[in-house]
Amino acid sequence: MQLNTAVTRPSESILQTNKLIRNTYMLLSMTLVFSGVLAYLGMMLNLSFGLALGASLVGIGLLWFALPRTQNSAAGIPVLFAVTGLLGLGLGPTLNYYMSVNPNIVMVALGGTGVIFLGLSAYALATRKDFSFMGGFIFVGMLVAIGAMLLNLFLGIPVLALAISGAVIMIMSGYILFQTSAMIHGGETNYISATAGLFIAILNIFTSLLQILGILGDD
């Protein structure tokens, strides 16, 4: 009897983990598509940078204050779609700018983001390594990156902007490993919050790649 119980518990744990991962990637796919549609709408409406900034700020506000209160219930799903949709809408003017400069930049950034995310996720899932030790480094790294961004708003140094974008890609890549590992090892049990974290990482990688390619392609 004890042996059957010992065998059953790991089996249930594996099933729960697989369900969490499946639900997370399914919801992530849906939110990425929805965000892409809203980004396209923002481009078609020729949304101003001011309105785009407002949409992004509202999305971030929902992410910080509304989602944590609703992520444990069905109400968290529409809140998550509101967050990802508003952030996608906020990308409209940025995408219009890069499309006017060189459409290939957007395509390469999209492709690069896909390769980075799929590669890191596959690695974490295949190796099942525990990347929980990266949490502190990611937190500190983001604080440093945000401080450097604020500083560069006044300095406007292209090389510093390039370095910041590269750092953000590295930090978000680490976060993808961290979050995927957390789902595997029980550190994350909520597929809504897991989806939100992975979405933000993908969004930051994409926008950072846009900035890098834009700077490198600037004559």
Image: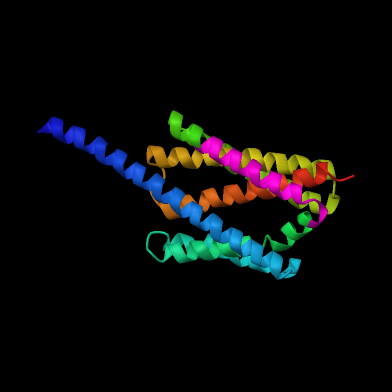
Q: Is residue 68 above or below residue 128?
A: below
**Residue 26 drawn at (x, y percent):** 44, 51
The residue lying furthest to the left in this view is 1
Quarter in which the C terminus is drawn: top right
x and y, in percent, of residue 187 in the image: 41, 42
Quick check: can you spot residue 135?
no
Horizontal side of 151 relative to 115 (left or right) equals right
Q: Position of residue 51 (x, y in %)?
A: 70, 70
Which of the two residues, 127 or 188, is positioned nearer the viewer here?
A: 127
Q: Which residues are magenta?
A: 100-121
Query: 25 or 70, which lies in front?
Result: 25
Task: List the single residue furthest toward the right.
Answer: 219
Asked whether the viewer can see residue 205, the reply is: yes
Q: Determine the main secondary structure of the stretch shown in magenta.
A: helix
Residue 105: in magenta span: yes
Residue 140, located in which quarter of the rendered image?
Answer: top right
Q: Residue 206, image x and y in percent? A: 66, 48
Residue located 80% across and 42% down the image:
160
Relative to 159, say whether 66 is above or below: below
The residue at the point 14 percent across, 33 percent down is 4
The answer to whether residue 8 is left or right of residue 90 is: left
- Looking at the image, residue 179 sits to the left or right of residue 38; the answer is left
Residue closest to the eye, 40 or 215? 40
157, 194: nearer the viewer:
194
For the N terminus, the image quarter is top left
**79 relative position to 46: left or right:** left
| Chosen colour scheme | rainbow
Q: Is residue 35 magenta?
A: no
Q: In the figure, residue 47 lies in which quadrant?
A: bottom right
Give the residue at x 80% y 49%.
Answer: 152
Q: Residue 35 occupies which quadrant of the picture? A: bottom right
**Count of marks, rendered view:** 0
